[in-house]
Amino acid sequence: MSEFHSLSHDQQVAKLHELAQRALQHWDGEFQTVELVKYRENAVFSAWRADGQRVALRIHRNGYHSEAALRSELQWMEALGAHGITVPQLIRARDDRHLIEVLHEDIGEPRHIDMLAWLPGATAGTSEHGVQADAAIDFLFAEAGALAARIHRHASQWQQPDEFVRHAWDEDGLIGAEPFWGRFWELEGLSDAQRNLLLRARRTARSDLRRYGRTLDNFGMIHADLVPENLLIEGARLRLIDFDDAGFGWHMFELATALYFCLDDPRYAQIEQALLDGYHAVKPLSAADRAALPLFLMLRGTTYLGWIHTRQGTQTAREMAPMLIERACQLAEAYLHHQA
């Protein structure tokens, strides 16, 4: 563990704030009112440029994504924006780079940093607490489904740059020997019965994924984090932020992600119906797609266990572990029952 990671949360934030102030010198304009907005995988700061433009400065976690992968994320976002899909607009650094690399002596490790234009709107909810109680469910999830379908349809036709690099939420990335977010079955806190249940679901999923198959119609670049806090509502418009998890994956995994943090909502049946209907209106879903939803809900649940397994000791992992373990096991049982 680096010296930086041994610091308290508040000490880390203070160092990252200093880094943000220094990094802003690489962009045109004078910036002020630099404030932390979110600190989980990345540290996201809000800043105001002298001309009134609000921006988001993202300081990326060291070692999570390579520079090539981060550049690829931004290239895809630029392509989506050019296609008319409202995503955060990249603001390139003064030398026209997508992102910069800065080494702060008090942090001791290089950090990649990029800048995005701030998108207006209120979040639809949070991962911890789900969708806002007063949210217009039919509108929100029909729009979210349609937005996901437009993104998937665009990705199936888009010619990627030659050096495009992103991780994959494929069989190996989800249930292989080294899943992208970690070996979920090794998570401390799992009972023997829970671990055996998850391993049984993992084995069954391997054959089901191969039976379901991978085609341009059901697999490609996905956002992979279509959770309430990444959906911004402004009037009758829905916008999507935070492409940090974007990679190659099944389209139904995208929809399972959108549903995952709504599973305890008493309006869940309405939410699922609106999401699938909104998606289907833009990009038709087959019977096989719909039948695969329990599979991908279960897989989404195991990825979050992998996430907390590889981030044990963090406040988020400690707080969410009980809920994530219980939900992953419920989804595994529902999936295996569905297969029986």
Image (cartoon, rainbow, N blue to C red):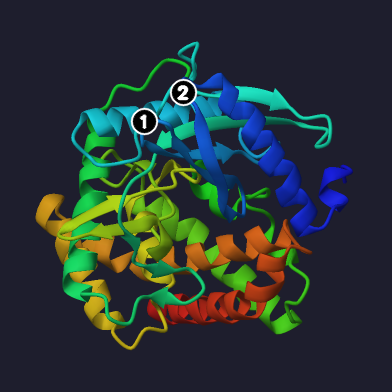
Per the image, the residue denoted by label 1 is 51
Residue 166 visible in the picture:
no
Q: Residue at x 62, y 54 (%)?
A: 40
The image quadrant that residue 62 belongs to is top right
Residue 171 position within the rendered picture, expressed as x and y whole percent measured from the top left: 51, 49
Q: Residue furthest bottom?
A: 266
- Image position of 281 (left or right of 230): left
Of label 1 and label 2, which has the lower sequence position? 2
Residue 4 position within the rendered picture, expressed as x and y whole percent measured from the top left: 83, 44
- Image position of 55 (left or right of 255): right
On screen, 325 above or below 248? below
On screen, 36 above or below 258? above
On screen, 54 above or below 92? below
- Image position of 179 (left or right of 223): right
Mark 1–mark 2 CB contact (< 8 Å): yes
- Image position of 281 (left or right of 328): left
Q: Residue at x 53, y 79 (%)?
A: 327
Query: Along the line of sight, which residue is nearer the eye, 274 or 183?
Result: 274
- Element type where label 2 sits in the image: loop
Residue 149 position within the rendered picture, expressed as x and y whole percent measured from the top left: 22, 49
Q: Residue at x 87, y 42 (%)?
A: 2
